[in-house]
Image (cartoon, rainbow, N blue to C red):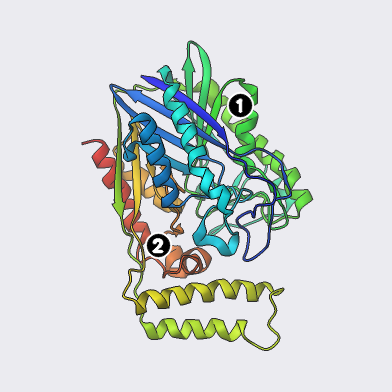
Amino acid sequence: MRIGFGKVDITPRIGVELCGFGFFLNRYAVGVRDALYARALAVEQDGTTVVVVSNDLIGVELSSTTEVRRLVGEATGLPPEAIMVHCTHTHSGPATLAGLNMMGTPDPPYLETLPRRIATACIEAVKNLAPATLSHAEVPCVGIAVNREYDKDAPPLEECLCEEWCPAKPELTDTTCHVLTVHREGELAGFLTYYGCHPVVCSATTRYLHGDWCGVATGMLEREHPGSVGLFLQGAEGDVNSCVVHKPEKEALLALDVLAARYANAVRPGLEQAQPLDVDTVSCQRMEKTFTRRPMSLEEVEAKVAEQEAIIKAPGASDEDGTVRATTAFAQGWRQVREKIQGGLPLEPPTEVQGFRLGPLELLAGPFETFQAIKNDTQAAAQAPIPLVLAMTNDWRGYATDRTCAARGGYAAEMVPLLLGTTPFADAHGELVAAFLELDAALHA
């Protein structure tokens, strides 16, 4: 088996708009707290090569992934199904999602140059392929995350910054992280870590570029092992926040190092304890999928448009009002839904799911902010001994909520679809689990 790494700086220039934390915030970068990177891993076995690249970004759209694959394919000969473009989902990076422009407008020059930067990391990883050993460990990881849907979200700083802090319901988050190490001639060439939690230690008041807790922790570990490259793989973070979130800038930036250190402390034993994997096969699968949206009548949608417009067009309505800004975002969404229904257009475009198999290890990746229950159901039924469910990969199509949250409604289930100009999913839980298990079966065929 041969393994290679590549790493390219993808930090934008100062002044681009950041993405996340609210609507029409005019949140522009004022400085670089930590550089942002595209970090790529290539693995080759018996003539089959796959590449996964982890980017310190909120996400990418399928058009960007398609361009990355084209560039990498031209340089290496790899097919699209062998190239996986993954994002950590930092909310302190540049806006890169045109469909989420109400939370940050993408910068055209940055978007135009981004695919080649990401592709360069992938191409470097393929060029750097050399004999190596891949090892794995699963180690305890607590004190970072809290389930924001089913537990107490955003506990006070004096609570969650205590070293012994633990959420009331840790079982609703990941309580372990997975660590993969790559050794070449006895030296650590690189590593991957996997954990599911929103990178949202910072807030609407912070304007510095960085990869949040997972990016800062990865940088710490790389510096401890000079010459190594570390990839963070984002798991089922859809209903999971960092325990520090929505705090003022000063407190948030200080807490950033605390949570990054906690994650690095969890990973370090894994770097030491990882045991070699028997990677007898390397394979990949990619499947186009269109996930079902709930139908609505034109009359229902017209009523929703009128409801939103009554707020934003009321006498005295001001753009300084956060409610008006949020309602504007939803009004735009309902108008897009109306246009689709009137034009006979589909509510949901095709997207994709993708899977890599590295012996006993699988990466099962989708374009969603995936809920924990979906990950749990997938892992329970998968054939792979080590199935890792990845969020935010190759595209962004909103949240894949579990059935309980979908029935209850709210931000993830009902509001985010509007930002994409569509309606809630009919059954994202069932359809995504089925798609992942279809990938799993194909990878074991």
Task: Measuring from the top left, give residue 186's x and y in whole percent.
Answer: 50, 11
Under circle 1, the secondary element is helix
Q: Nearer the viewer, residue 110 or 269?
A: 110
Quadrant (top left/top right/bottom left/bottom right) for the N terminus: top left
Numbered circle sitting on residue 222: 1
Mark 2 and mark 1 in contact (Cβ < 8 Å)?
no
Task: Measuring from the top left, give residue 290's x and y in whole percent.
Answer: 31, 59
Outermost residue toward the right in this view? 250
Q: CA distance from mark 1 to mark 2?
A: 39 Å
Q: Nearer the viewer, residue 303 or 164?
A: 303
Amino acid of disc 1: Glu
Camera-side mark, 1 or 2: 1
Quadrant in the rendering for residue 337:
bottom left
Image mark count: 2
Judge the density around disc 1: few (<14), some (14-19), many (≥20) Cα neighbours within 10 Å: some
Q: Earlier in the sequence, mark 1 or mark 2?
A: 1
Task: Measuring from the top left, give residue 125's x and y in whole percent.
Answer: 45, 27
State left or right for residue 444 relative to residue 273.
left
398 to 92, vertically: above or below:
below
Outermost residue toward the bottom in this view? 315
Task: Look at 71% across and 39% down and name the residue there.
Answer: 257
Q: Which residue is mark 2?
A: 403
216 to 246, vertically: above or below:
above
